[in-house]
Image: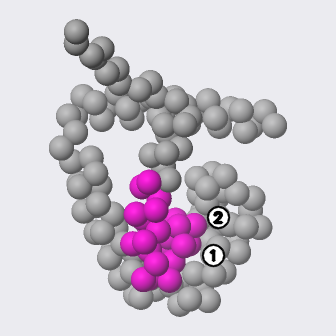
Amino acid sequence: MTAPAATAPLLDGQLIGITYHAVAAVRDRMLADSGLTFHRSVALKAVAEGLDRAGAAERLTATLKIEEPEANALLDEITSAGLFDGAVTERGATLQRSFTDAVTALAERLYGDLPDADREVTARALAHVTARANVELAAR
């Protein structure tokens, strides 16, 4: 008698959550030495990409699903840390490049050998789930 074939799990909120927390734990350990939190790293990325304070705050509210006062508090935090002064500082740019390089290497280790077709299907599915979640948030 043979064992039944294992079936792949279906994409659902639990699987997405478990994956998110595993990747986030690795990311947070990478960030720990820099003094950045994930939210601060997103703020730093926004200003490193050339957004002014208003544009960065808008990106933070949209990406992190936070309110504008919280976004401005994050920008104040990276300003106090010497990473932003109306534009990204040299120290901020160096830190952002270092973190981006580390994340690029991590992504290669985590996703690099997955078939492109699988990555494309997953990306489309996650984009749909994100869009639907954004509709739900807007309705509340």
Other residues around mark 2 within 10 Å, as few (<14) / some (14–19) / many (≥20): many
Q: Residue at x 40, y 63 (%)?
A: 26
Camera-nearest residue between 53 and 4: 4
Q: Where does the image place residue 91, in percent across and percent down from the top left?
A: 41, 88
Q: Secondary structure at mark 1?
A: helix
* Residue sitting at x 22%, y 39%: 114
In the image, residue 126 above or below residue 80: above
Is 28 included in the stretch rendered in magenta? yes
Q: Badge 1 is on which residue? A: 75
Disc sitting over residue 22 in the figure? none
Region in magenta? 22-51
Is residue 127 placed above or below 18 in the rendered structure? above
Which residue does the numbered mark 2 point to in the structure image? 57
Let me know if residue 94 is in the magenta part.
Answer: no
Res. 132 visible in picture: yes
Amino acid on which disc 2 is placed? Ala
For image coordinates 73% across by 67% down, the residue present is 70
